Image: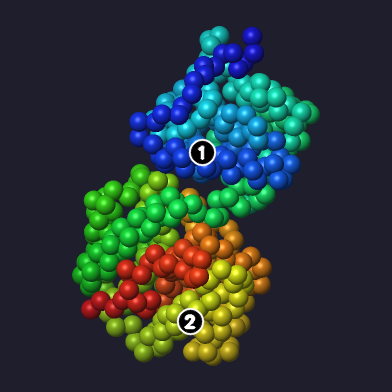
Amino acid sequence: MTELKKCYERKALSPEFPYMPKTEWEGRIKKAKKIMADKGIDALFLLNRKNWTYYFGWVKPYPYVYPAAGIVPKDGPASFITEVLGINSLELKGYAERAIGFRGDPKAPTPVAPDPVVAMADLIKDLDLDNGTIGVELGPFGWWTGFTQAEWEKLKKQLPKVKWVDAQESVVWPQRMIKTPWEQDTIRKMYQAACRGYLKAIEFARPGVNEKDVFKAMMEVWLNEGIIDSIYQMYVLQTSRNIATSFYEDHILKQGDYIFLDGGPSYKEYEVDCQRQIWIGDPGDEARKWAYSAEIAHIEVEDLIKPGTKMGALWQKGHEVIARYLGKSIWQDIRSPQWIGWVGHSVGLGLHEPPYIVEGAPEELQPGMVINLEFPAFSVKKKVFYNMPENTYIITKNGFENLTLDLGPYGIYIKT
């Protein structure tokens, strides 16, 4: 008996609470198969949690412990293999033409619990892929979930004739980088609610208020809006000391503090990343000058946000504006190892997705991309962020849609 025979199999095509419409899922699988055909790849073997969500609508609200894999063949059924609780989650929310489950006790002395890695190899053989070229996430941002190095080596030994190639850069990112209309609507809804939470925090913050209560006021908005998938998926960074970013503290706000709002909740596994800064008390003329430079940098760079613009051109323009206000010596900081380096990135299922806005970046903006722009007024010497607004844009056919427009001005908020 093969290990695959110890598993059970069914179709998962009628979820009770669908992560996405079935037509959206079908479109993603169809596009992946076309890209694979163009690249000479016979199948995707997916071990990244976000890719499981993207290609199968598979969402699990806790860190994974058993091996799991999604397989998208160029020719054949989209298949997902995981332990029984994972299959239950898939049936509830996601899609797979072959949903293969197994008991999660392979070390127990029971004949019905398979070796999951060997079962995966058996599935690849059953799909007639054991002599093929299979893409796996070997490139940047292709972190695996619940699959160890030892299990990877074991899988390769089971399939000696398979040619393993990277699919993260050749297939996954070209597809995930361009958001579908459904994705754009999902992200748009998420940001509208996220902005309302930020504005509540800005309204609530003032001298004498506990920093924790500022966070609570913001989080209550997001809970009421229904855009928090789970608490562990909510990334909000705040600080009231002169460091870059940390989580909120049990601290009473006082003159001279600042709050650096960054990140946000997640919705449908998509993640918010925007920034605004609140100064407690008047920060003084020098701080206002620095803050203004970052504000104007964002405004002027928006003239370049359109299809065909290179990421590196955004980097150059923004820093030229900051140097105009702070002096040419700021270029020493900009190219310092202590500078943030990248000043923008793509965003979606990942908080920071490629391509990045860095010096000389050749990648061009394309319709359907969702990018973030975040030029900092940052003193390397004092280790103070005077202002670092961050906006999120959908690239349209002729320009952009600013998803963070509801947050208002790109300058700092001063609360006395």
In the figure, 110 relative to 50: above or below? above
Q: Quadrant of residue 307?
A: bottom right
Q: Which mark is residue 390?
A: none
Q: Earlier in the sequence, mark 2 or mark 1?
A: 1
Which residue appears at 76% of the width and 28% of the height? 131
Q: Quadrant of residue 407?
A: bottom left
In the figure, 248 relative to 95: above or below? below
Q: Which residue is mark 1?
A: 26
Of 326 and 384, nearer the camera is 326
Find residue 348 and report its horizontal and vertical position in percent.
48, 54
Of 202 and 72, nearer the camera is 72
Disc 2 and disc 1: Cα gap in Å?
Answer: 40 Å
Inspect the image, locate mark 2, and give the three-letter code of the amino acid beneath it.
Glu
- The quarter of the picture where the C terminus appears is bottom left
Which residue appears at 29% of the width and 78% of the height? 414
Residue 281 left/right relative to 109: left
Find residue 260 and report its horizontal and vertical position in percent.
38, 68
Inspect the image, locate mark 1, and give the three-letter code of the amino acid beneath it.
Glu
Is residue 144 shown to the viewer in this render? no
Which residue appears at 48% of the width and 76% of the height? 302
- The quarter of the picture where the N terminus appears is top right
Crowding at mark 1 (Cα within 10 Å: few <14, some 14-19, many 20+) = some
Task: Tell me how the rendering is colored.
Answer: rainbow
Q: Which residue is mark 2?
A: 300
SS for tag 1? helix
